[in-house]
Amino acid sequence: VGSVTACERIASAALESPVTEAQAHVKNQPVKNADETSWYEGPTRKTVWLWTVFTEQVTVFLIRASRGTQVAKDLLGQARGVLVTDRWCAYAWWPLRWRQLCWAHLKRHFQAFEEVGGKAGRLGIALLKEEKLLFEWWHRVRDGTLARSTFRIYAAPLRRRVEALLRKGAACGDSKTEATCRDILKLAPAMWTFVRLAGVSPTNNAAERAIRPLVLWRRICFGTHSEEGSRFVERMMTVACTLRQQRRNVVDYVTRSVEAHMRGACAQSLLPDTAL
């Protein structure tokens, strides 16, 4: 067991420099998907937070004690490009014009309205109908059978209908539904960024898929025993996820990086334009 820990420590040190470079790289990308989930750290398995930022060819992870705004700012840097997220308040500092809310999360809210019944239930049914129509058009845009300019024309009246329904929901008589509708309306411009800009997804599925292996790791291995272990996890998973995106061999890269570290040299960059 001690030998395994020693190997992890060496690998973590070898990967520190390229991972730091990757963290700087994602901050400057035109489209970023961000997500976070709980993690366990230390002998008492205290709850900390696992963060990820997914971009087209590089994905990074961080494990930090907080789920707050400062960590989001450390991870994302200045508000550059479009950020795709759920409604978590740590991202509220990002300008709404350059933010995209995840429609998969919105759909779950609409389904919850439907389950309430009454006015909220009818509201949920109506919103789900609009969501279904929007995604039928979106899938055609993605497949190349509907021009984006036409999609924008189609989406304009749908946007008005959805926002009108949310305003009705804010006074539907069910307190939870009302609160959710008011919160969504505050972020309403961020629901439609994907309609306006090419290359932006209407869902945060990319970040959720990236973080899924670590969710399984947490369930099976119960997190990490120390901050040092957390650094190993975030660095190793940054390397593994990024290299798979670029179709580069993970084992070969880690092996070369450790060998370089043992010689006192630097590991090869993770950035796509530096691949051998």
Image (cartoon, helix red, strand yellow):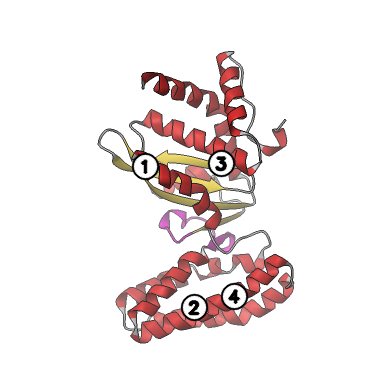
Indicate the secondary structure of the residue bearing disc 4.
Answer: helix
N-terminal of the pair, mark 3 or mark 2, is 2
Q: Amino acid at mark 2?
A: Leu
Residue linked to disc 2? 128
Residue linked to disc 3? 241
Q: Residues within 10 Å of mark 3 (few under 14, many from 20)?
A: many
Front residue of 260/93: it is 260
Question: Rounded to the nearest whole Å, what is the CA distance between mark 4 and mark 2?
Answer: 10 Å
N-terminal of the pair, mark 4 or mark 2, is 2
Residue at image position (60%, 48%) is 55
Q: Amino acid at mark 4?
A: Leu
**Range drawn in magenta:** 86-101
Residue 25 in sight from this viewpoint: no
Disc 1 versus disc 4: nearer the observer: 1
Indicate the secondary structure of the residue bearing disc 3.
Answer: helix
Residue at image position (68%, 74%) is 151
Q: In this rendering, would 240 be left or right of 222?
A: right
Indicate the secondary structure of the residue bearing disc 2.
Answer: helix
Question: Rounded to the nearest whole Å, what is the CA distance between mark 1 and mark 4?
Answer: 38 Å
CB-based contact (under 8 Å), mark 4 and mark 2:
no
N-terminal of the pair, mark 3 or mark 4, is 4
N-terminal of the pair, mark 2 or mark 1, is 2
Q: Is residue 143 above or below residue 7?
A: below
Label placed on residue 134 = 4
Check the image and name the residue furthest to the left: 44
Residue 158 placement (x, y as % from top left): 58, 80
Q: Amino acid at mark 1?
A: Ile
- Quadrant location of the C terminus? top right
